[in-house]
Image (cartoon, rainbow, N blue to C red):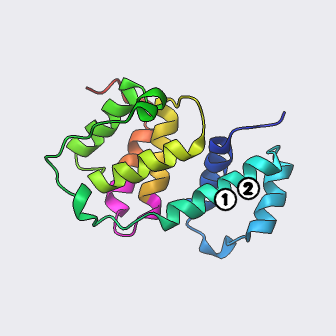
Amino acid sequence: MMKENVLDVLMYLFENYLDDDDNESEADRDTLTVELEEAGFAKHEINRAFDWLENLAKNPPDNEPAISQRDALRVYAAPELEKLSVECRGFMQYLENIGILEPAQREVVIDRIMALGNAEIDLEQVKWIILMVLFNRPGQEDAYARMEELVFDESLGVMH
């Protein structure tokens, strides 16, 4: 079965390589591409996933003054509203309210969601993208650990 979604590739990479505490298993892009193709991913989607990760690493630092005000209200653009359901936007706001997601990180999350190209994205996918963003940000180990608990805790009910 061919998996055609860039997010599927990203989640596979994250689960199998990025979140691995054993840093000795640093595989290069060519090796990972072969492994991903063997796992059933299309080369085009693999390349898009690597580009997505490279752009994540290039995103601006979290100390952008324009988006660091806690009391600022985020107004979503029409394409963002089309892609992000009320549930997804509410979840990101919830994460900001409890101190897991900073406003600047939220902007990186939204940027990476928009870069996926999917028509709409569900809450589970948003959670994974947030995990990837926090993982990629220095000094966010506590926020990452808290987010990881939210993603992997199946007993977690609906949040308001």
Does the stretch in magenta take in 69?
no
| Farthest residue, direction front | 78
Q: Residue at x 83, y 43 (%)?
A: 40
Q: Is residue 93 left or right of residue 129?
A: left
Q: CA separation, marks 1 and 2?
A: 5 Å
Q: Main secondary structure of the magenta part?
A: helix
Look at label 2 and name its amino acid: Asn
Query: In which image quadrant can residue 81 be found?
Result: top left
Read off the magenta span: 135-144
Q: Residues within 10 Å of mark 1 (few under 14, many from 20)?
A: some
Q: Which residue is mark 1?
A: 50
Q: Residue at x 65, y 76 (%)?
A: 24
Query: In which image quadrant can residue 50 be found?
Result: bottom right
Q: Residue at x 39, y 40 (%)?
A: 150
In x, y percent, where is residue 66? 24, 59
In x, y percent, where is residue 155? 40, 29
Relative to residue 59, is residue 145 depicted above or below?
Answer: above
